[in-house]
C-alpha cells in the first residue's frame, strides 16, 4: 500500500513546518490529488490516521481536493481537461494528446492552532 509511504512523507513535511513555525497542533490538512495520481482515497484516509498518531497532526482532518487530468491536444492546439488518459480531445475529438497534469499530489495548506 503506497498510501502509507505517501502519508509518511506528509508527516515529515508537517513535522518540518511545525518545527520551523512553532506549531503545536494541526487541525486540518488539505492535499491536492490529481485524477491520474493512482491514489486510493479510502486507503490514504486510513493511512493518514495511522501515520499521524503521536504527531502534531494526530486527530487532524484530511481533506482531499481533486485535480483534473489535463492534456495538450496537438490537433486543436488547446489545453483541455480529460477524464481518462486515453480519452479523445473534448473540444475537437482528436486523438493526439500529450498529458500535461493530473498525476500530482501535494499539500495545499495546513490549518493550525
Image (spheres, rainbow, N blue to C red):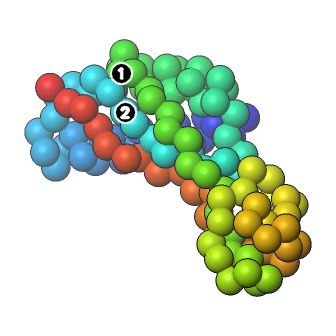
Helix, strand or loop for disc 2 = strand
Give me the residue at 49% from left, 45% from top: 32
| Rendering quarter of residue 100 | bottom right
Residue 66 locus on image (x, y percent): 56, 41
Q: Using the rendered image of the protein, determine whether residue 54 is visible from the camera's viewpoint.
A: no
Residue 10 locus on image (x, y percent): 44, 42
Q: Nearer the viewer, residue 62 or 87?
A: 87
Give me the residue at 68% from left, 83% from top: 77
Q: Using the rendered image of the protein, determine whether residue 23 is visible from the camera's viewpoint.
A: yes
Q: Residues within 10 Å of mark 2 (few under 14, many from 20)?
A: some
Helix, strand or loop for disc 1 = loop
Q: Which mark is residue 48?
A: none
Give me the residue at 85% from left, 73% from top: 94
Q: Nearer the viewer, residue 31 or 5?
A: 31
- Is residue 5 found left or right of 64 in the rendered image? right
Q: Quadrant of the N terminus?
A: top right
Give me the residue at 37% from left, 47% from top: 108
Residue 49 locus on image (x, y percent): 49, 20
Residue 85 locus on image (x, y percent): 81, 59
Residue tagged 2: 29
Alpha carbons under labels 1 and 2: distance apart: 7 Å
Residue tagged 1: 60
- Is residue 60 found left or right of 4 in the rendered image? left
Q: Nearer the viewer, residue 46 or 87?
A: 87
N-terminal label among 1 and 2: 2
Do callouts 1 and 2 mark residues in contact (Cβ within 8 Å)? Answer: yes
Q: Nearer the viewer, residue 80 or 51?
A: 80
Amino acid at each position: 500500500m503506497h498510501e502509507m509511504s505517501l502519508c509518511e512523507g506528509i508527516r515529515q513535511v508537517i513535522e518540518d513546518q511545525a518545527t520551523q513555525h512553532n506549531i503545536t497542533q494541526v487541525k486540518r490538512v488539505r492535499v491536492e490529488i490529481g485524477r491520474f495520481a493512482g491514489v486510493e482515497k479510502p486507503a490514504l484516509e486510513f493511512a493518514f490516521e495511522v501515520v499521524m498518531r503521536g504527531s502534531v497532526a494526530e486527530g487532524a482532518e484530511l481533506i482531499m481536493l481533486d485535480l483534473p487530468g489535463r492534456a495538450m491536444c496537438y490537433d486543436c492546439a488547446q489545453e483541455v481537461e480529460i477524464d481518462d488518459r486515453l480519452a479523445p480531445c473534448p473540444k475537437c475529438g482528436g486523438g493526439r494528446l500529450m498529458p500535461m497534469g493530473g498525476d500530482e499530489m501535494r499539500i495545499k495548506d495546513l490549518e493550525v492552532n
